[in-house]
Image: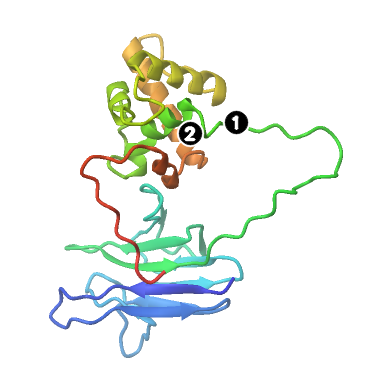
Amino acid sequence: MSGVLVHLPSDGGTEAARGPVSLRLGPGDVARFGRGSASVPVELRLPHPAVSRLAGEIRVTEDHWQLSNLSTAQSYLVENPEGAGEYFRVPPRRAGAPVPFEFARVVLPTQDRLVSFQVFAPDHVYLGSGGSAGQGGTDTLTAFSLDRTSTYFLVLVALCEPRLRDESAVAVATTPQIVERLRNHPVCGRLTARAVSSHIDYLAEEKLRIAAPGGADSGPGGRRNGKREAIVGLVLRFGLVREEDLEILPPRRGAHRRPEVVGR
């Protein structure tokens, strides 16, 4: 691992405006952040009265980086801006919490606004596809076998799109929305609502093996909504559908390109 880049955006909204600050840290390096003072020096200064003088520290290891929350009262959030709302919470006094994101935003709460900075880590390293070849025995079964060229996978991506685009943390696309979303796709131009429902049932029952949700008092609509939410929750948790899969959907009307992150 070649280290990480810590970036603090410019603070143009304050009276003593400052420009952006960037720190490069290598394996074994530690950077402390907080409000700081003459007796408490910090490498990353966050000049807000609600931020502790010594709020936390970043420690870089050989293959990841860790975040320590030195506050006694405030929890911090570590967000994945590229992960459809993915985040985790670092509670007070938690030391050395490993951060799995390649691009992360550390958020500290204050009374009037959120104070945040970004951390860019190198791309994750993956093993080759050889795996355990030559060890003998029967082959390992694939947990979830999805054909990414199939129509049902297009339906699955359209179903997950609202969460992947962070438009809603809870909503999933309805059948009419999926039909309309795929109308301009060369393969799905004549896709009907009944066909979409069949693809969703096939995904839940055959490909993902999701048990029928709801109790005895759940009506058909409740069971179907619960099934959709269970599908989306499962595939996003295990990364079976990712943000880059949105490229297989037709362009959205009036859609604008997302701004690229500068500095990575």
Establish if 29 lies above or below 130. below
Mark seen at residue 29: none
Residue 74 in percent (x, y) is at: 33, 61
Quarter that holds the C terminus: bottom left
Q: Secondary structure at mark 1?
A: loop
Q: Quadrant of residue 6?
A: bottom left
Identify which residue is drawn at 18% across, 76% down: 12
Question: In this orientation, does residue 209 appear?
Answer: yes
In this figure, which residue is indicated by the disc labeled 2?
A: 234
Can you identify the residue that label 1 sits on? Answer: 145
| In the displayed structure image, the side of residue 215 where residue 66 appears, left or right | right
Q: Residue at x 38, y 22 (%)?
A: 226
Rendered view: 62 above or below 15: above
In percent of the image, x 43 and y 21: which residue is there? 200
Q: Tell which tag, 1 or 2, sits nearer the viewer.
A: 1
| Front residue of 65 and 262 | 262
Mark pair 1, 2: CA separation: 14 Å
Indicate the secondary structure of the residue bearing disc 2: helix
Query: Residue 160, how many percent across, how many down?
Result: 38, 35
- Name the amino acid, label 2: Leu
Q: Residues within 10 Å of mark 1 (few under 14, many from 20)?
A: few
Does residue 42 lie above or below 76 as drawn? below
Farthest-out residue, left: 15
Q: Is residue 21 above or below residue 106?
A: below
The percent coordinates of residue 37 (x first, y second) are 30, 86
Neighbor class of circle 2 (other Cα within 10 Å; few <14, some 14-19, many 20+) is some
On the rendered image, what quadrant is the N terminus found in?
A: bottom right
Image x and y of residue 44, in percent? 36, 79
User: Measuring 46% from the left and 72% from the top, which residue is drawn there?
Assistant: 58
Locate residue 95 relative to residue 255 in the image: left or right.
Answer: right
Q: Nearer the viewer, residue 154 or 27?
A: 154
Amino acid found under the numbered disc labelled 1: Ser
